[in-house]
């Protein structure tokens, strides 16, 4: 007869750094056959661009211009999540303590947040996404069908972050 069409969901996984969001989100996306969205990687990729250009973060006009000229794509390379910045693979280059710090600073900019949220919503517009990041279930996808909040002790989170770097 007729196959019932199943609507793909948005799964939002939120929590502090080192809580296990990435580990759980990657595994869940793989199990469901969904796209894995690492919002932190998107901010780190833009931080890479800012660092490359030696931009002044207080120059809103320049920030807005560079944001509009920046294309960030989340891709999969050999079964592993990757990030392209204007067509260039920056996956490994964006995982440094310095870029993480810069990404945190950049993420406080209203202009940057608005653009990143716009990009993230575009990626999630068709559903079939497991998205992880801070504020993902409250700001980016407030109507996500599934919302998960992960946490771990401060000692465990610190240990995990230390091992990352």
Image (cartoon, rainbow, N blue to C red):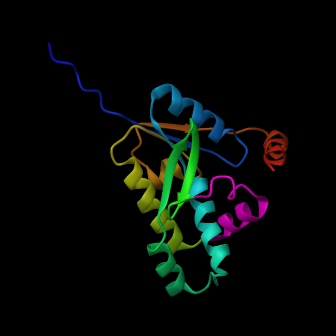
Front residue of 126 and 108: 126
Was residue 103 drawn as part of the magenta stretch in this picture? yes
Front residue of 17 and 125: 125
Locate residue 23 relative to residue 11 in the image: left or right: right
Quadrant housing the N terminus: top left
Q: Which residue is drawn at 62% across and 58% down?
A: 90
* View extreme (top): residue: 1
Position of residue 66 measured from the top left corner of the image (x, y, whole percent): 51, 77
**88 w.r.t. 146: above or below:** below
Position of residue 72 measured from the top left corner of the image (x, y, whole percent): 50, 60
Q: What stretch is highlighted in magenta?
A: 89-106
**87 w.r.t. 49: above or below:** above
Position of residue 33 measured from the top left corner of the image (x, y, whole percent): 45, 30
Q: Which residue is drawn at 70% across and 49% down?
A: 17
**11 w.r.t. 94: above or below:** above
Was residue 80 drawn as part of the magenta stretch in this picture? no
Position of residue 138 measured from the top left corner of the image (x, y, whole percent): 49, 51
Locate residue 95 relative to residue 62 in the image: left or right: right
Q: Which residue is drawn at 64% across and 67% down?
A: 48
Numbered-mark total: 0
Front residue of 86 and 162: 86
Where on the picture, by quarter, is residue 8?
A: top left
């Amino acid at each position: 007869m007729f196959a019932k069409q199943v609507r793909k969901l948005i799964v939002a996984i939120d929590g502090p750094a080192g809580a296990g969001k990435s580990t759980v989100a990657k595994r869940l996306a793989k199990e469901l056959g969904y796209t894995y969205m690492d919002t932190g990687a998107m901010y780190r990729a833009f931080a890479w661009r800012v660092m490359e250009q030696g931009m002044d973060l207080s120059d809103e006009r320049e920030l807005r211009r560079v944001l509009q000229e920046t294309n960030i794509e989340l891709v999969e390379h050999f079964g592993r999540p990757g990030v392209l910045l204007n067509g260039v693979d920056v996956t490994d280059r964006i995982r440094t303590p310095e870029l993480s710090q810069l990404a945190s600073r950049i993420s406080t900019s209203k202009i940057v947040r608005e653009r990143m949220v716009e990009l993230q919503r575009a990626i999630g517009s068709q559903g079939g996404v497991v998205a992880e990041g801070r504020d993902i279930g409250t700001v980016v996808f407030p109507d996500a069908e599934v919302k998960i909040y992960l946490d771990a002790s401060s000692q465990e989170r610190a240990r995990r972050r230390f091992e990352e770097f």
